[in-house]
Image: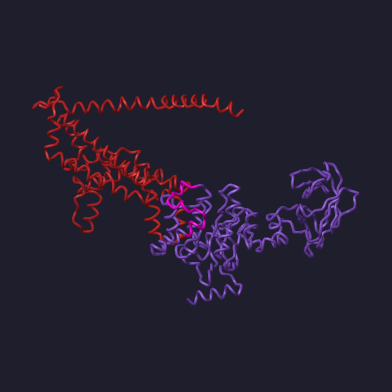
Amino acid sequence: MSAAAAIAAPAPVSDTRRSGLALVVLLIAPIALVNALGFLVPVLNLARMSFYEVEPTGAMREVYTLATWLTVFQDTFYAELILNSITVSLGITLLTLVCSYPIALYLHRSSGTWRTILLVLVISPLLTSAVVRTYGWIAILSDSGLVNNALSAIGIAPLRLMFNKTGVVIGLTEILMPYMILALLAGFGRLDPRIEEAASTLGAPPFTIFRRIILPLTLPGIALGCLLCFVLAVSSFITPKLLGGGRVFLLATEIYDQAIVTLNWPLAATLSILVLVIFGGALVLYTRALRAIM
Amino acid sequence: MTDRITAAAAGQAGEGFLSLKGLTKRYGGFAAVDNLDLEVPKGELVAFLGPSGCGKTTSLRMIAGLVPATSGRIVVGGQDLTEVPTHRRDMGLVFQSYALFPHMSVARNVAFGLEMRKVGKDEIARRVKEAIALVHLSGKEEHRPGQLSGGQQQRVALARALVVRPSILLLDEPLSNLDAKLRDEMRNEIRDIQKRLGITAIFVTHDQVEALTMCDKVVVMNQGRLEQVGTPVDLYETPRTAFVAGFVGRSNRLKATARDGVAEFAGESFAAQAGLSGPVEIMVRPHRVALSAAGADVTAGDHRVSGIVARTIFAGDILQYDVDVAGQIVSVELATRGGETVLQPGAAVSLSWRRQDVFVYGAAA
């Protein structure tokens, strides 16, 4: 009986495995197709375009040249642009993390209707477009805005909060916070109040519990949130454009200008590929960090 | 220093090492724990036993400082800890869910409490090794909790709590997540370790077998109130309330009516509390009832009733009869010796039991 079963067993097992594989392929096929058409083909197109020649008149010719790439690597303006983009985005990511972490932790610990209400409040900004929210910030941060009016009312000299990095950082931080909070929440799965209580009974005061237990256990969420916000910060251009007022030079705004204003498509394509390279680097850092944490 | 000496003296005088004085926890109008008074002598293992929601875990969490008491005092070794935060209470707590630090190795988990106490590195290494050996996990020091079985994780939790030599070891249903075989093993192990270290321990459980077999004393709780405190034998042989009689061990509960301290059931009179009148419950344990076929020589016993066998259950070591007596079922358990006649349903039988095996309680309105 058992011998017969042992002989008969392999066939049905491999059958199920084969049909399982077929199902997986079938389920992945639509998204693979969409990604191929909507992402891979345009990116390859961009890569090709970055090698096209630009005539002095600005017209693009389908002749391959390294000229654009050489300009980008030789002109210090672009090196500064890339560095500026990375540092500003890192700063925004860090600030977003600091502002979002306590909110996410509180949300994680709340329950019932209260939690639902808070979650809706966190998500609700995503229901309005970033453009609308940026105009909201203009109303608050401009020279005659809410903050400066309040400051002048109590006799303090007005602050330059717009058309500089400060404005961009403030605006993007607020716009990215919902993403950060959701990513953090998703990564807080290992956090268990019993574990914190255990640490407390073992003699750990509250701050030590945070440092030795809560923070390490939430690192996966922090890594995920930072990756997401960094990518979103590097690629956002409406907020930097409006709050930066053309005085803050970032990769995304420069790509927009080259593509729409100057019509230098090869340059825009080259910078776009560079953004992709930066994202690739961020992804590598993220997986490295995750491996170190877990 | 003086505190320690008084504490030791108090311990010798038979007073509680841990005293709970009128300990109460209210959530709004609901009293989760209601005026709990308890003295636990040094070195004893005391069970908090009761159904879920009886307040046993809340009491434990108040002792640990994880839940603030609404009123009452918690005194350990003569020192009032009621207002002391958890991390300065010096207690060891073992959770049902283990609550190990998932990001730390077994050794780091066990070392945590010692690091908090600023113990020197060499001593930490030595004591962690000892504690891990104590729970038979040597060789697993560098494993992560996730790589261990439930039983092993609970051993790590035990080692982590014991390594700091806490004044009191608190165990919150530590065996509930383990399978039956492991549970028996851990039960003996926890008891052995507790005795060997002479540590005062509170063991919260809803399992009366755990409470009776492991603990020096059992505190039976129900609806936030203390029902009875006593040794396992006390609780089983002289349950003070209907709840204790019903919760500790199995009991037949027979509805009857009492008049002036005498309860009537199936033509037999049972002594109840003097002056008790109205509905009562008569309780007798199934294996304390003697059974004989009707007409046979009646076995010795203070009370006799007759009935008809309604159901026969042969469980190998035990032969159980459910006997219909005046419309109510009385279960009778007999230890099998081999060779006895198994009576079939419909057989007329007479039951008897001794006076000391009967408890009569006023029925709850």
Which quadrant holds the C terminus of chain B?
bottom right
Residue shown at the point (44%, 53%) measured from the top left: B141
Task: Classify residue B189 as left or right of residue A56.
Answer: right
Q: Is A106 covered by the magenta stretch?
A: no
Pinpoint residue A129: horizontal percent, then vertical percent: 31, 37
Figure check: B161 above or below A269:
below
- Taking depth in this image into account, of A148 and B228 the one nearest to the observer is B228
Pinpoint residue B114: horizontal percent, then vertical percent: 43, 62
Figure check: B355 above or below A174:
below
- Taking depth in this image into account, of B153 and A229 the one nearest to the observer is B153
* Shade representing chain B: purple
Task: Classify residue A1 as left or right of residue B262.
Answer: left
Q: How many marks?
A: 0
What letter labels the chain drawn in red?
A
- Taking depth in this image into account, of A209 and B299 the one nearest to the observer is B299
Task: Name the quadrant containing residue B308.
Answer: top right
Span colored in magenta:
B130-148
Q: Is B135 covered by the magenta stretch?
A: yes
* View extreme (left): residue: A56
Pinpoint residue A65: horizontal percent, then vertical percent: 13, 26
* View extreme (bottom): residue: B2
Task: Classify residue B67 as left or right of residue B282.
Answer: left
Task: Classify residue A259 as left or right of residue B365.
Answer: left
Residue shown at the point (33%, 38%) measured from the top left: A128
Task: Name the quadrant containing residue B87.
Answer: bottom left
Pinpoint residue A105: horizontal percent, then vertical percent: 40, 50
